[in-house]
Amino acid sequence: MLNQLDQVAHELCIVLTSQTPGTPEAVFCHDLKDGAPLGHAIGTIDGVSLPAEAVAAGRDRLRDVKVTHTHPNERVNVSLSDADLRVLWLYPGVTEVDAVTLDGRWFRARRVERDEDHAQASRFAYHAIRRALLAEVQLALCPEDTTPDEVMSMAV
């Protein structure tokens, strides 16, 4: 369910994208605690940079920043992208990211808790995902009688 500020942010991004030649991505950032806007920007069809004020706020782990942006490219119009999730990892003050399609569908990623050692949590998540992907590849290449433990030992 969207609150009123989320609705405005979604609509603003859709309008910025729709009314700009080339239908680029648009972003709007605001503070979740007080609703104060932290800026907006227009990028290209493949991406958009965060406004400077949002970057500064996003680096402060005590802030609660919301990033809302459009996905105008039909090929990536289905969900959150890896770049969306990286924003959550790179900026400890960013706690929510909404990706909005031009037809109004939206997808949200939210930080559930703050980790004191953000860099360590990021490395752990990266390596956990890497091991899981390597295990999938190994599983596809291994004989059928390979056990899951054998596959996991290959992925390390």
Image (tube, rainbow, N blue to C red):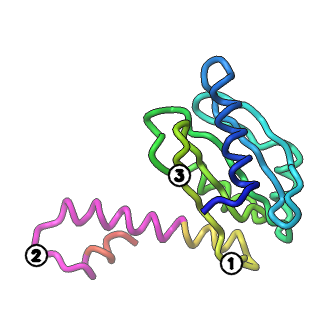
What's the distance in space between the residues labelled 2 and 1, CA to CA?
A: 40 Å
Q: Are marks 2 and 1 in contact (CB under 8 Å)?
A: no
| Helix, strand or loop status at disc 2 | loop
Q: Which residue is mark 2?
A: 145
Question: What's the magenta region?
Answer: 126-150
Residue nearest the viewer, comparing 142 with 12: 12
- Our reading of the magenta stretch's main secondary structure is helix
* The N terminus - image quarter: bottom right
Mark count: 3
Counting residues from the start of the chain, the first of labels 3 and 1 encountered is 3
Q: What amino acid does circle 3 point to?
A: Leu
Q: For this view, does 118 lie left or right of residue 72?
A: right
Q: Position of residue 73 (x, y in %)?
A: 51, 32
Q: Is residue 22 magenta?
A: no
Q: Residues within 10 Å of mark 3 (few under 14, many from 20)?
A: some
Q: What amino acid does circle 1 point to?
A: Glu
Counting residues from the start of the chain, the first of labels 2 and 1 encountered is 1
Q: Which residue is mark 1?
A: 113
Q: For this view, does 58 lie left or right of residue 88?
A: right
Which quarter of the picture shows residue 152? bottom left
Q: Residues within 10 Å of mark 2 (few under 14, many from 20)?
A: few
In the rendered view, tell whether residue 8 sits above or below residue 156.
Answer: above
Counting residues from the start of the chain, the first of labels 2 and 3 encountered is 3
Q: Residues within 10 Å of mark 1 (few under 14, many from 20)?
A: few
Mark 2, mark 1: which one is toward the viewer? 1
Q: What amino acid does circle 2 point to?
A: Asp
Q: Which residue is mark 3?
A: 80
Q: Residue at x 85, y 43 (%)?
A: 39
What's the distance in space between the residues labelled 3 and 1, CA to CA?
A: 19 Å
Q: Residue at x 89, y 55 (%)?
A: 36
Q: Position of residue 38 (x, y in %)?
A: 86, 49
Residue nearest the viewer, comparing 66 with 151: 66
